[in-house]
Image (cartoon, rainbow, N blue to C red):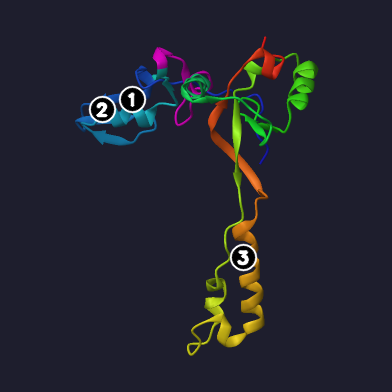
Amino acid sequence: MAQDTNKTDIVVLSSDEAAAHYETGISGWVDRCGRFWGEDERMARWAGSTHQKCEEYECDGIIKKGSYCLICSYAKQRNRYNKMPKKLWDEQYPVYSQTLDLWFVSKNEIDEYCDDNDLTYTDFDLVIGEPMYASPISEDIFSDIYSDTVDSLEEIDPVLAGLLKQVNDYIATSTIPLSYIPGKFAVEIETEVLGKSE
């Protein structure tokens, strides 16, 4: 079915008269869609509303019910970022920009991005990445296909069991990260270190 592109969403707050009304004949609250809520005015108004007021940071913006306020969401993100412990970045690990949802591996790469997009380091909300390493592989991954009489991989295939041990021995000593996640430290902004903090 084709959608009516000319149709506009209506805005109904829980405090609006259209959100709900009180029916004297049935002695209770009925939302604007006709559902009866008895004496529960709060639920009737909530069910009959399409939008709500944002209650974060005294914003009072109007947002769709069940959605969130982009302005306040960003403010909360900035607040969390500003409370993070700071650390100088030595470029050993990449950094993640919470604002841009991008990873950067060097200061030169960030400098180029700043030049291309007219930004400064303070626009990025940079967080130092935390390396993620491979975890040991348990032989339990094969346990679902063992017969009831088998207790270990060694009993069935000692060669495979030996290779699995070699892999796990390598994993235990490997210092090569497979990926990175945003870590606990924000990048400390210093002109002489980052070059474009202003």
Q: Are marks 2 and 1 in contact (CB under 8 Å)?
A: yes
Give the vertical position of 20 relative to 153 (above or below): above
Badge 2 element: helix
Pick whichever of labels 3 and 1 is earlier in the sequence.
1
Q: Nearer the viewer, residue 56 or 79?
A: 79
Badge 3 element: helix
At x 72%, y 33%, the residue is 105
Q: Are marks 3 and 2 in contact (CB under 8 Å)?
A: no
At x 43%, y 13%, the residue is 59
Q: Is residue 69 magenta?
A: yes
| Residue 171 x %, y % | 62, 60
Which quadrant does the N terminus fall into?
top right
| Residue 82 x %, y % | 50, 20
From the viewer's perspective, is 24 left or right of 185? left
State how far apart marks 3 and 2 are (Cα). Answer: 65 Å
Q: Are marks 3 and 1 in contact (CB under 8 Å)?
A: no
Q: Which mark is residue 125?
A: none
Which residue bears the numbered disc 3? Answer: 169
Q: What's the magenta region? A: 57-73
Q: Nearer the viewer, residue 93 or 169?
A: 169
Q: Choose mark 3 or mark 1, whichever is in front.
A: 3
At x 30%, y 31%, the residue is 43
Q: Residue furthest bottom?
A: 149
Tally of numbered tags:
3
Which quadrant does the C terminus fall into?
top right
Q: Residue furthest front?
A: 173
Q: Which mark is residue 20?
A: 1
Amino acid on which the number 1 mark rests in the picture: Ala
Q: Nearer the viewer, residue 197 or 48?
A: 197
- The local crowd at label 2, few if under 14, some if 14 to 19, many if 20 or more residues have their Cα within 10 Å, is some
Amino acid on which the number 3 mark rests in the picture: Asp
At x 66%, y 74%, the residue is 163
